[in-house]
Image: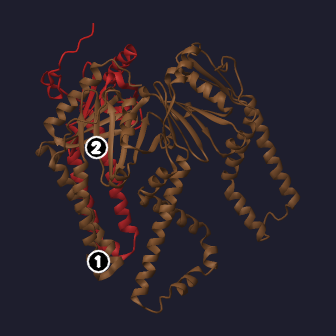
Amino acid sequence: MELTDFSKPTRQSSKGILVIFALNSYKFIRNFFGLFLVYGLSISKNKSLAFLSTTHITLIILSIFIVILVLAILKFRNFKFYLDTDEFHLSTGIINKDTTIIPKSKIQNVYVKQNFIQQLINVVSLNIETAGDDKAEIEINALDRETALDLKQQLFSKNHLVDLELDEKQMQTTVFFKASVKRLLLEGLSQSHIQSFLIIVSFVFGLYSEFGKYVQDLNLEDRLESSVEFETGNILNFILANLLIVALAILISMLFSVIKTFVSNYNLEVIENEDTIEINKGLFNKVSLTLTPAKIQNLVIKTNRLKRYLGLHTLSIKQAMVNKKQQKNFKIVALEKDQVSHLVQKFFKDYNDEGVYQKPDRYYKRLLMWRSIGIGALVNIPAFFVFGAYFWLINFISITWIVLFVHYTYKKASYQITDTYLTITSGFIDRLRNISELHKIQSVELKQSIFQKQKNIASVYIATASEQVKIPYIKEHDARSIYDYLLFKIESQDKNWM
Amino acid sequence: MFTNQQIDLETLPTIDDIVFKPISKRYLKIIVLNRSLFYSLLFSALIIAKFMVEAVNFHLVFWYVLWGVVLVCIIDVVITVLAFKKRKYAIREQDVIYSKGLLVNSISAVPISRIQHLEISRSWLARKFNLATLKIFTAGESGIDLSIDGLNYDEAKQINDFLSGKVNGTN
């Protein structure tokens, strides 16, 4: 395989103009959408601004787009990058010239993305992210897939002159996992639909508050009422109608979850290389990520009872990064149990699932109980206003909930500290397992309230560069020795955390 | 040479042995000044409202509200003053430790090798009292960052220099 030479300043593919143009036009339209709406309304009412004729408007819009196009071309012309042995250089800016230099060793992530427009004209964008702040993020908008992959590989390789070695590594690439349609469907169906439901509800409310007036004009309420026929006063009808609404809500939420799962995980593929893992996925926004074990701060394995039964596990890979939106891409869904263990072992070599897990003190259970009883008691107040005299019936639901919540949350909480790894499990419906390497810990904190002090209980908070985890409510003596042990482990090893 | 001795957990350096150093007493004055400013604003707002608002309901509850605020104020000030004694720090060979809080006590430790950057910040009041706040940042947003208030300015500078020297030395 011949590698592209990036040692001379290069521009991206000339299709980049189109991508930049489309992106800027989209941004422009989104920013001035409100203005257009106001303008459109005022035209329809023939009030102000009517002195502008249609030709004028067309001309104005046309000139705006020409300006955007010219800017896109200039931006493209001034966007140059090159790579030397250990640094990536980028110069940008039309009037204010910016030069960004990133040492290869500081690069956290390189990922290849392809949005809808880029899919149409067959280019990809390459993002380079460091652990620093947002501004250090670089996006190259338009590269051929081949070139992008080359660049990515060269960014990761210590020395891009050693081509032979790279070739050898290429040979050992295997497709480790491919999510079938059936598994993705199951994954979508077994998701927590509450979240989807909330998204839909907020979306509908958002729409309603924008276009409420028009909806009112349609007399929707009258129609709804007449179709459900409240007048009959038949209690059976009333229950049926409510059940129908609930069933519809569940169905729509499920559909939404399934579609969401498919759109973001379409063609999910995990590729195993010599010492990295590659994830490819996405329908409208195709992403391709390379994961290096050294940069991974935490691994989170998530499943629940139903999913475990179906053999579905989600592995989230947490790295030190600023872009929260990207974080959700670092996730592999629909994995079998042994596939998860295989991947975990790929990232954390000496990790094994076995070993004894320690439990938090029973104080944690009591605390959970008192907290949820407090919330349960408060629920009575709104219930009184909604249901009137029958408000106390709600306590049947909340007591069941509290019992289940306290029991399962306590049951699932545990922790394990070995020579090199820290594992913490938690969750109520979901079962979460958070694994991190001891030498990647950034800081430790011991917390204890005045009541816990009397009972000799304390919690330990442990932060890595990507997440903060908590060992909840253990004996103070244990907490202190964990604290000392972790600090000793961090400080006595001369390992880098990234 | 590589060794792999078994570690006796009992002999590890422990936080129980640390002799913490309290922060400057002058910082209590700053806290008290800040609090009194806040509560005097609150009280004056209440008293102005007493003369301006004409709604009867307001006057019915006014005294309850006033005494409620007085109670909260007293409790808050007492707790703050007591909690002041809990603010203390220690610098070991390998890490910086800061402990604070009365109702919820926390002891945070940042290993020196994990420090990303350091910052000394001084508010207007702090400059008047010749005090400074030393902020110690680790990588990642979610990290536990230390912010040691009420250090003598010279001391803060000294610690800052010591730590940055060590951070740069180890890198």
- The residue indicated by pointer 1 is A391
The spot of residue A456 in percent (x, y) is: 12, 42
Crowdedness near tag 1: few (<14), some (14–19) or many (≥20) residues, C-alpha within 10 Å? some
Q: Can you say which quadrant of the picture contains the N terminus of chain B?
A: top left
The spot of residue A384 in percent (x, y) is: 31, 76
Front residue of this view, candidates A475 and A61: A475
What is chain B's hue in the picture? red
Asked if residue A201 can be seen in this view, the reply is no
Crowdedness near tag 2: few (<14), some (14–19) or many (≥20) residues, C-alpha within 10 Å? many
Q: Which residue lies at the image location 49% right of the left edge and 52% below the top edge?
A: A182
Front residue of this view, candidates A136 and A352: A352
Asked if residue A438 can be seen in this view, the reply is yes
* Alpha-carbon span between mark 1 and mark 2: 37 Å
- The residue indicated by pointer 2 is A425
Identify whether A322 is placed above or below A179.
above
Mark 1 and mark 2 lie on one chain; the one further toward the N terminus is: 1
What residue type is disc 1 on? Answer: Phe
Give me the chain letter of mark 2. A
Specify whether A362 is left or right of A216.
left
Helix, strand or loop at label 2? It is: strand
Specify whether A284 is left or right of A177.
right
Q: Quadrant of residue A490?
A: top left
The brown one among the chains is A
Front residue of this view, candidates A344 and A365: A344
What residue type is disc 2 on? Answer: Thr
Helix, strand or loop at label 1? It is: helix
Q: Can you say which quadrant of the picture contains the C terminus of chain B?
A: top left
